[in-house]
Amino acid sequence: MSIGLFDSGVGGLSVARALVRRLPQAEFLYLADQAHAPYGGRPGEEVVDLTRAAVTRLFSAGADLVVQACNTASAIAQRRQQQTWLQDYARAIGRPVNILGIIVPTIEAATGMGWTQHADPAAQARPDVLGVFATRGTVQSRVYEIEIAKRRPDITVCGQPCPDLVPMIEGGTSLADLAVAVQGYVAEMIARIGRAPDRAILGCTHYEIIAGLFRDALPPGTPLIHQPAATAEALTGYLARHSEFNIGNSGSRRFWTTGEPGPQNAMVQAFWGAPLSFEPAQ
């Protein structure tokens, strides 16, 4: 058994790295759907179908839990999967399985409130502008605006689509060119708000690979809410409450791709901290 991680590409490695550090004994199987990356500009139904296919592949390979380390998939497909087929699938294979996303722990970190908590109408706080840099699909879903408003109406969310960043990161574009692109997206957000955001979420796991470029483009000291750390914290708590899930104990790591197998680009390997090669997805 193992923990499965799924992303359209290499961005989910940012979550995988945090989980490996937190749960070194667990067995991990990572699947990158690079044949169909990026997901951010795809129609919603196509994202749902691709996500279901990837999750099913990980369950079939022995994963008990799958972490959707992709904001687009979590925003568009998570609820549909939970409501329409997951329970029937678990009964069919005869073992407990579940799908966890990364948006819930990110919103909990951004609001300081648990997922089941809602706003206190009597509470007053200074207005807080939270910038969310994400794919077009995640921004259009408005999941951050909707869910944060339920808990913290004093937080104003400004979503900024960054459609060029995932293809650039997947393609190994130079840091200099990526810096120009990031600066442009930050400038667009500041122009729309009329000032810099008070805090920011990197709402695509690919962006964690270049988090330093966002820090450089934003005003000094702007806090960044990091999804990998929030996800690792949430998963550790979830496993403590759900002993029925077997995450293994050999510490094995496997990396699959639906795209071109082999070593990843130098920027990705530097982020991971070791040579990294993907095998063909089975």
Image: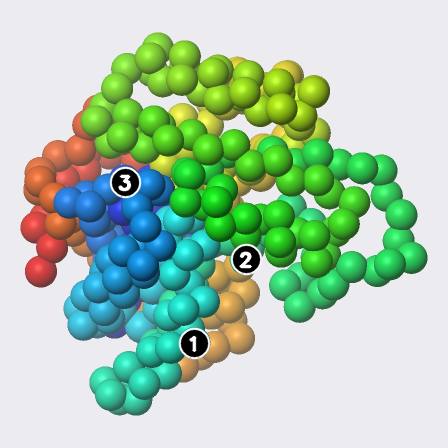
Q: Position of residue 180 (x, y in %)?
A: 41, 12
**Badge 3 or badge 1: first in the primary sequence:** 3
Q: Position of 230 compared to 74: left or right?
A: right
**Badge 1 or badge 2: first in the primary sequence:** 1
Amino acid under disc 3: Pro
Q: Position of 141 compared to 115: left or right?
A: left
Amino acid under disc 2: Val
Quarter of image, res 138: top left
Work out whether residue 23 can be spotted: no
Q: Nearer the viewer, mark 3 or mark 2?
A: 3
Q: Nearer the viewer, mark 1 or mark 2?
A: 1
Between 268 and 126, the one lying in front of the other is 126
Q: Which residue is labeled 1 in the image?
A: 83
Q: Which residue is labeled 2 in the image?
A: 104
| For residue 150, above or below residue 170 | below
Q: Which residue is labeled 3 in the image?
A: 38
Res. 222 mark: none
